[in-house]
Structure formats: C-alpha cells, structure tokens
Image (cartoon, rainbow, N blue to C red):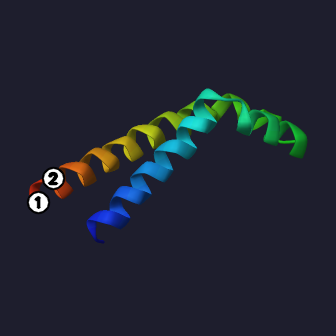
Amino acid sequence: MNDKSLLMVGVIGTIIAALCCFTPVLAILFGVVGLSVIVGYLDYVLLPALAVFVLITIYAVIRRARKT
C-alpha cells in the first residue's frame, strides 16, 4: 500500500468513526431500522476503531515525512 492510499484510508476512517462516535448518526440509524438494542454496545467498537484509524493516519504522515 502506498503512502497516499494509506493516508486516505486513515483520514476517511477517522472521519467516519468520529462522526459515529460523537454524533448520534448510528443511534438514529439503528433506531429507524429497529436495532436500537445494539446502541449500548457501539462504544466498545467505535472507540477502538477511532483509535486504530488515528494511529494509521499518524503512521502514514510519519512515513510520508521520512520519504521526502
């Protein structure tokens, strides 16, 4: 995976995970679909996912900076 695509995956994943963590996007979506039972467990998945995508973004930025 090249640096540009790694950075894009990190940034896009961070934005999506942050939107789902800090706004009620998934809570509303799951409520509409009828899966509101899952809303209580979203933090167990979304916060680690946010951390992973932030680490991917940091890794891609460092890797890109060392290359130039």
Q: Which quadrant is home to the C terminus?
A: bottom left
Residue in the image at 33% along x and 50% along y: 56
Check disc 2 and give the amino acid type. Ala
In the rendered image, which residue does mark 2 sit on?
65
Check disc 1 and give the amino acid type. Thr
| Crowd tier of the residue under label 1, counting other residues whose Cα lies within 10 Å: few below 14, some 14–19, many 20 or above | few
- Does residue 27 appear left or right of residue 1 in this picture? right
In the rendered image, which residue does mark 1 sit on?
68
Q: Which quadrant is home to the N terminus?
A: bottom left
Give residue 54's quadrant in the image: top left
Residue in the image at 37% along x and 66% along y: 5
- Does residue 19 appear left or right of residue 68 in this picture? right
**Disc 2 and disc 1 in contact, CB within 8 angstroms:** yes
The x and y percentages for residue 7 are: 35, 57
Find numbered disc 2 in the image and state the secondary structure of the residue it sits on: helix
Find numbered disc 1 in the image and state the secondary structure of the residue it sits on: loop
The x and y percentages for residue 41 are: 64, 33
Q: Which mark is residue 40?
A: none
Give residue 63's quadrant in the image: bottom left
The x and y percentages for residue 55 are: 31, 43
Seen as rendered, the residue at the extreme bottom is: 1
Q: Nearer the viewer, residue 2 or 37?
A: 2
Residue in the image at 49% along x and 52% along y: 12
Q: CA distance from mark 2 to mark 1?
A: 6 Å
